[in-house]
Amino acid sequence: MPLYEYACHDCRKIVSVLARRIEGFEPRCPECGGSRLERLISRFAFHQSFQSKLEQLDPKYEKMVDASNPDLSFDSLVKKYRLDRPITKSDQ
Ligand SMILES: [Zn+2]
């Protein structure tokens, strides 16, 4: 069974969810039970694409990345994937 990573908008954590099937699958956050999950690409793919981007960037940028903990803080993921946009409602 595939393991997917999601950003949970309820508890603001990155969680892994085991998907029994893809179609109609409605993930629940294993941490808080919330359903406001945003699918992320796998860490492996993330790092691969991230690495290729880095190679095209100024070397100074690499230091910034190191400082910002590449192991995926919630906020950096939200910014990277713009997760705050599709789910955001008028409550803020
Ligand atoms: Zn949660």
Image: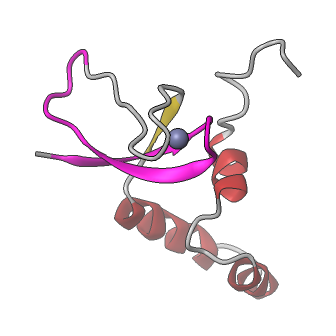
**Could you tell whether 85 is left or right of 19 in the image?**
right
The furthest residue to the front = 32
The furthest residue to the right = 92
**Who's the residue at 36% across and 66% down the image?**
44
- Residue 17 drawn in magenta: yes
Residue 26 x/y as whole percent: 33, 22
Query: Looking at the rendering, in which quadrant would you find the C terminus?
Result: top right
Residue 43 x/y as whole percent: 41, 63
**Could you tell whether 78 is left or right of 29 in the image?**
right
Residue 66 x/y as whole percent: 69, 85
Using the image, determine if residue 60 lies above or below residue 12. below
Quarter of image, res 72: bottom right
Using the image, determine if residue 67 lies above or below residue 46. below
**Who's the residue at 46% across and 69% down the image?**
47
- Colour mode? secondary structure
Magenta segment range?
2-24
Query: How many marks are shown on the rendered structure?
Result: 0
Of residue 71 and residue 31, the one placed in the foreground of this image is 31
**Could you tell whether 79 is left or right of 92 in the image?**
left
Residue 18 x/y as whole percent: 23, 44
Query: Looking at the rendering, in which quadrant would you find the N terminus?
Result: top left
Using the image, determine if residue 53 lies above or below residue 9. below
**Who's the residue at 74% across and 76% down the image?**
68
- Residue 28 drawn in magenta: no
**Could you tell whether 44 is left or right of 37 in the image?**
left
**Who's the residue at 77% across and 80% down the image?**
58
